[in-house]
Amino acid sequence: MKPRIIAIANQKGGVGKTTTTINLGATLAAYEHKTLVIDLDPQSNCTSGLGFVPKPDSISSYRLLLGEASVGEATYPTAFPNLSIVPSTPDLAGAEVELVGMVGREVRLRQALASVEGFRFVLIDCPPSLGFLTINALVAAEALLIPIQCEYFALEGVSELMRTYNEVRSYLNPDLTIDGVLLTMYDERTNLSQQVAQEVQSVFEDRVFKTVVPRNVRLAEAPSFGRPIHAYDLRSRGAKAYLHLGKEFLARQDAIREEVTRGA
C-alpha cells in the first residue's frame, strides 16, 4: 500500500508543529502503523526529540533533497517500534539557497519520496517559514495538517499559509488536501482559549479536530529527554490528548479511503 504523506506546517513558530509530528507519529506507531517522520527543519528539533543523534556519516534530509541519497538510505530506525526517521542536520539551512538555482526545485522531495515503501504514514515536519523547504513538503504531500495554538494572533500567518496552499494546488499539486486543523496549547480555564477555538472553528469548520492538545508541562519536557510523550509520561494529559488524536486521525483516514473508493 502506498503511504499517505502528510505535511505538518504553519509558518508561525511555536505552535506545536514538531511536538505534533513527534507525538502523532509515535501514536500511529503505537497503534501498529509503520510511520516515517521526515525532519525538514534545520533546527533539527524533531530529530533530537525522538532521541536520534546523527553520526558524522549519517545521511540527512539535506542530502535527500539534493538528490545525493535515496529515501531508503536516509531512513533510520528510532528506539520506538514501527517509527523511523529521516533526520535533519543544521546544514539543511543551506538548502534554501542551493535550491534556488536547481531545475525543478519545488519537486525535489516529491521525486525523492516516489520510491518510499514499507510505511503506512509519512509525516513531514516543516520549518516555520514558507520557503522552498515547506513548498517542497506541500508538493510532496497528499495532505496538510495545521497546528494552531490557542493564543493571541492564533490565525496570524495562517492566511499566508492558505494562500501558499492554494497556489501549490493550482500549479504544482492539485491533489493536496487539508486533513485537519489541530488546536494546541489549549487552557480550558481561560476565556482566550475558548474564544480562539471558536474563531478557528468558524474558519475551518469540520476540518478542526475534536481533540485539543492542552498546555502541559510534561509535554514540553519530553523532547529534552529524546522521547515522545507516551514514553515519557503515559498518564499525562498531553499523552492522553495525542492518543485521542491518533484515534480521531485514523478514523478520518478510514473515511477518506471510503470516499475515494466510492468515487472510483
Image: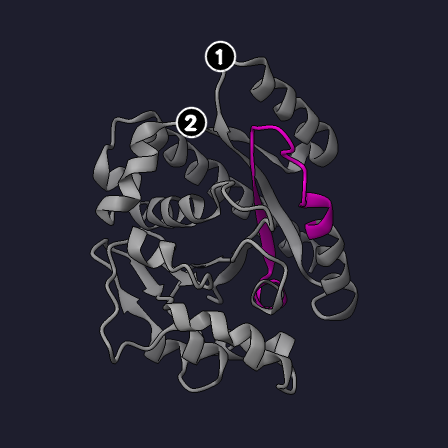
| Foreground of the two, 130 or 73 | 130
Tell me the kind of residue under disc 1: Arg
The residue beneath circle 1 is 189
The residue beneath circle 2 is 215
Residue appearing at x 61%, y 69% in the figure: 132
- Horizontal relation, residue 18 to residue 155: left or right: left
Residue 117 visible? The answer is no
204 versus 172 height, above or below: above
All told, the count of numbered labels is 2
Residue appearing at x 26%, y 69% in the figure: 54
40 versus 258 height, above or below: below
Q: Quadrant of residue 103?
A: bottom right
Q: CA distance from mark 1 to mark 2?
A: 11 Å
Q: Residues within 10 Å of mark 1 (few under 14, many from 20)?
A: few
Q: Which residues are magenta?
A: 136-161
| Foreground of the two, 43 or 118 | 43
Quarter holding the C terminus is: bottom right
Residue appearing at x 57%, y 21% in the figure: 193
> Disc number at residue 7?
none
Q: Residues within 10 Å of mark 2 (few under 14, many from 20)?
A: some
| Foreground of the two, 83 or 96 | 96
- Horizontal relation, residue 241 to residue 211: left or right: left
Tell me the kind of residue under disc 2: Arg
In percent of width and height, residue 173 lies at 69, 67
Q: For residue 193: magenta?
A: no
Q: Quadrant of residue 140?
A: bottom right
Residue appearing at x 49%, y 16% in the figure: 188
In percent of width and height, residue 36 lies at 38, 61
In percent of width and height, residue 111 lies at 55, 79
Residue 164 visible? The answer is yes
- Find numbered disc 1 in the image and state the secondary structure of the residue it sits on: loop
